[in-house]
Image: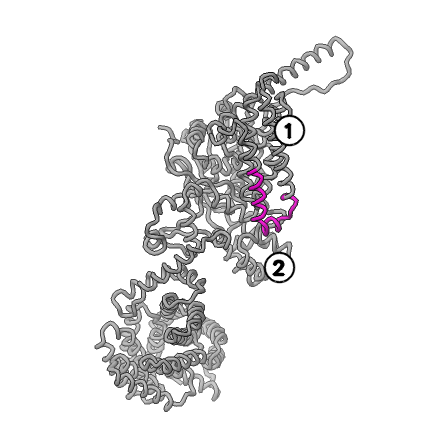
Amino acid sequence: MPSFRPSRRASKSLSDSTYDELAKPTATEYASEAAKSFLDALEAVAGQIPVPGVAAIVKIAKSIIQACDESHATLERAEELKLRIKKLVTILVDELKEKEAGDIQEKLKQDVSSLLSDLKYVQRKLNDLGSQNTLLLIVFRGLNEDKVKKCLSRLDNSLANFTLVRQINDTKLLDRLERRILGFHSSHQRTLHDVKSGLDDLKVFLKERLPLGPANSSSSQPRRCAAIPANSGIFHGRKLLVDQLVQLLTSNPEGQKRPRICLLGPGGMGKTSTALAVMAHPAMKKHFSEPNQIWVPCVKATSVSLFLDTLYSSVGATQNAGDSLKDVISEIKSFTEPLILLLDNFETPWNVVESRADTQQILYEIDQIAHVTLFITMRSSIPPCNGTQWHSFDIEAIDGTAARQIYLDICPAGTNDADLSMLLESLGYMPLAITLIANMANMTGLPAKKLLEEYNRLGTAMLGQGVGAKHGLDVCISLSVESAPMKRHPGAYDLLARLALLPVGTTYDALVKWWVVRDSPDLLGAMQVLAETSLIRRRETNYFILPVIRSYILHPSRFPSEIRTEMISSACNFLACHNASPGHPSFNEQAAAISSEEGNLQSILIQATDPAPGLIEALRVLAQHQLSTRPRLEVIEHALKLSRQMEDHQLIVGDVLTCYGRILLNVDRFDHAEEKFSLAHQIFLSIPDERRAARCALDLVDAYSFMGGIPFEKQTRLVAEARSVFERLNDAEGVALSLYYLGIITGQNHSRPEAIELLALARKMFHDLGDSGALNHSKCSFFLEQVYYWDKQYDAALIAGTAAVREYDCLSQYPGDPMLALGQILFMQGNYPDALETLDRTLAICKAYGRPIDISQSLEMIGRTLAKMDRALAAQGAYMEATRYYGATKVAEGELGMTRCRFFIRQAVDPALVPTFEERLALCGFHRDF
């Protein structure tokens, strides 16, 4: 059965990976490529046409096409102008190539003269544009595009009278015409060769008979195979992939079909450089002799004829039977040893959908040759033809270590730059982006922090200016974004723009349910195109796009503003549907859903600048979720900023301030928390909203319990006032909450039996409330654990603590506090192995949550437990790390903690050491055995 069956699968995409371009053919190496060869042949044929101006037209056309190539990075319509002119001169030369002067009508000669005049006009305009520097071309891009548009218009006016314009859009005809002109040129070359050979024979004949002086004779030499370019000297992070590819390419047993390898991935990932590293591997050189390693640069093979021409020149074909494919196959078959063909940037010919069947047939015929191995690189996520026929490899970003090596190889001055890791991470560890920004750092001397600021401000345009503009990121990415498959499916760019706003990616189900317009006509088709162009990546069930592609798409000149508005609305809707409170039957499921989309939700909402109640509520819900998982300030700060712009919605401002204060408490910023609670309390009193004001008063008591130094009477007065309001409003939950806080401050004031009674009563009231009281019920269990511990009732504390940890886990709440207390209880009971196991788990949870005091205290207790287990050296290490974390806090407990740990470090060396008075005060405040 044929290995390459024609398929109706939609096309793959693009042209070239620019990182690969940095390590592959230079302009000189590309000079012999198919497109230029065709234009050279066209010019030679035009020179034989007996109509004034035709040869000049082709010569000017070549010049314009070159100018268009050079300006493609900055002028989008240059490609359109180039293709239009190329098609025109191809048809013109084909029509006139075999005619005598007397056969050509006068009207046609006049049209040719007019066309020559218009082309000269276009050439002048492009020369004017080309004289601008890169920055001006970018800044005044719109004006320059208008000038190119005028060139197109001028050309259209001339073409209106030119009778051959009717054929310009017939792609198959153009391919046929190219082959016909090349054949015509080749036949003339053979005729010239025959004449030259005859003259050489005549010279030999005459030399034998006449005393002629020395003459230079030449004979035709076989065309040599294209040399494989040398790879870049800076190549890191691909050793495992290279070794894997080499192993596969060199290990096929005798008689078995040789493997077909397809290296896939986005532009800028280093497909070509990796392929060249494979070809240069010693094992490859041993398996495939140097003449049998053939590089076929397909980057400019934009038609079947150009693809065949590229193959023809790459394999060094010498036969010219008028059928390029037969000539190529014949040449390949003439090799007697194993042969490997590296078809680099194969997406270029593959994406010409109109001729894909012909391209597929070429691959099929080459694949039938037993000694040939096909090795293809493509800017795509899907291999060509039938994907099951290929050993397919998706090239990923390199790791942080390799990224750093690339950067420092180019810019050694960055060795000790503390911000370098953040810069490399922001670029997604893409080799091309790292190479470009390292070159910029080396040239400008700017540190990583400044480069990152500029990248965040300018995006990918920053990495594509100056002499290397054609290798810039914008050019690289545009080859994918502006490819033929993307243009054929208008919904693909819409989907790409939406995915650009989802930095952590999303699943297909979430995409359909939350992020895509419900009436989107062909989501699967759009996803297929993005996969084929390698603009979308998939990791397990998650779809995402690379950071540098996100940066490119999100540039204001490219990003549709209406999509941002729609995505903000979608994010608000998502959070409105996932705002259940702890204890609600659906809370855990909803919290998990928010966690999976948290990075996307924050990225979208933090960019919203128009205040609205729904938006601020969405931000508050997200901040409340972060309070349970890992408290951060960015979301709630943005919510407060927007809410303060809404003077008529003071209730919203108060709710945001309350949430803000609770987050500040959990990052140990107690003074700032008190400030936010006080502001919220004043707002609620002024509205007035008694219930909210009373709850905010209890939040103030919570802050005071951490701060220390607040009179007990002041705290009890606030609790009593709040309880009075709740009793008047018949708010059972508020009354229970008042008893809970009264129990906390009473326990801290050393009235332990009374505190236990108050907390037990509050816990029962929360239990009676059902689901709505579940969270506060668990808090009561925790503080009962604490008070029992303070009172040295360790068995009762263990029961309460075990229940508290279980309840916190069931509610998906941060269990660090009850687990730390549980470890302390086990320590005091002398159960050191269980204490250490509990404290180790506590430390991991505290680090994930990010609360410095909890991390410090966990480490301190681990140190004490290790010391009790006669592991003094490990204990000292734990104390030293705890000291470092305590030092990072800005609260009184931080100073006390450092005092304790310094004592314990000395005590590990001298067990008989007695604490000083100051040390004893610090020790007694946290430990029960001093």
Q: Residue furthest left?
A: 768
Q: Amino acid at mark 2?
A: Leu
Is residue 152 a member of the stretch shown in magenta? Answer: yes
- Is residue 775 or residue 523 the one in the foreground? 523
Q: Residue at x 64, y 24 (%)?
A: 52
- Is residue 134 or residue 929 the one in the foreground? 134
Q: Mark 2: give few (<14), some (14-19) or many (20+) Cα within 10 Å.
A: some
Nearer the observer: mark 1 or 2; the answer is: 1
The residue that label 2 is drawn on is 446
- Is residue 679 or residue 751 the one in the foreground? 679
Left or right? Give the position of 836 relative to 556: left
Left or right? Give the position of 707 relative to 149: left
Q: Mark 1: give few (<14), some (14-19) or many (20+) Cα within 10 Å.
A: some
- Is residue 297 or residue 797 the one in the foreground? 297
Q: Quadrant of residue 692?
A: bottom left
The residue that label 1 is drawn on is 56
Q: Quadrant of residue 832?
A: bottom left
**Residue 400 placed where, x, y %?**
50, 55
Q: Quadrant of residue 229?
A: top right
User: Measured along the vertical axis of the image, is residue 183 above or below residue 575?
Assistant: above
Dot 2: element: loop
**Residue 813 placed where, x, y %?**
33, 70
Protein image colouring: one colour
User: Measured along the vertical axis of the image, is residue 926 above or below residue 143?
Assistant: below
Earlier-in-chain disc, 1 versus 2: 1
Q: Which residues are magenta?
A: 129-153
Image quadrant where one finds the C terminus: bottom left
Image quadrant where one finds the N terminus: top left
**Residue 264 placed where, x, y %?**
45, 42
**Residue 889 placed where, x, y %?**
48, 76
